[in-house]
Amino acid sequence: MKPRRYARLGVAGALAIAAVAVLITAGGQPALGFFSRGLLLEIKVGRQATLVARGAAVTVPVRITCNKGIFAFVSVAVTERVGGGLVKGNASRQVICTGDRQKVKVSVAPGSGKAFKPGTGFAQATIDGCIPGICGEETDSRAIQIVKPT
């Protein structure tokens, strides 16, 4: 009987160690997105935005995932230091979700008289959506490289 008890304790111990290892390695990972009662919303800002019309706007790529068939709203805000001031702008667009990962481009015009320039900026993107009985929102932000079109 004792060997069997030790075998059970060994299996239980191995499972406990595996669970702790998963928690330790997963602790530094970013959140997967908003998921509640069947509503899935994920968004990720791309690393690089492209100037449009010599800085009259920047096109920011974002990757989204959301429930198939719902309408979602994707909003992007961009801030860049140009000279001694800040150039800021925001824009949004409606997207029909496919249920798969989608690449969406949002063109953001500056809200001031200044133009965006090649360099480093900051982008924040938000996705909002609803299914019957629940609405949600997910946000991502990062430093981006603003580049001239190729």
Image (cartoon, rainbow, N blue to C red):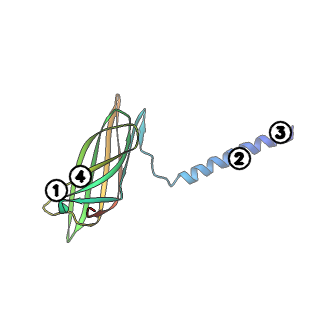
Percent position of residue 78, x then y: 26, 57
- Provide the residue designation for mark 2: 14
Secondary structure of residue under mark 4:
strand
Tag nearer the camera, 4 or 3: 4
- Provide the residue designation for mark 4: 107
**Mark-to-mark CA distance, 1 and 3:** 72 Å
Secondary structure of residue under mark 2:
helix
Q: Earlier in the sequence, mark 2 or mark 3?
A: 3
Which of the two residues, 36 or 143, is positioned nearer the viewer here? 143
Amino acid at dot 2: Ala
Amino acid at dot 4: Ser
- Provide the residue designation for mark 3: 4
- Provide the residue designation for mark 1: 111
Amino acid at dot 3: Arg
Q: Residue at x 74, y 43 (%)?
A: 11
Above/below status of 94 relative to 142: above
Secondary structure of residue under mark 3:
helix
Amino acid at dot 1: Gly
Marks 2,4: beta carbons within 8 A: no
Q: Residues within 10 Å of mark 2 (few under 14, many from 20)?
A: few
**Mark-to-mark CA distance, 2 and 3:** 15 Å
Q: Residue at x 46, y 52 (%)?
A: 30
**Mark-to-mark CA distance, 1 and 2:** 58 Å
Marks 1,4: beta carbons within 8 A: no
Marks 1,2: beta carbons within 8 A: no
Q: Residues within 10 Å of mark 4 (few under 14, many from 20)?
A: many
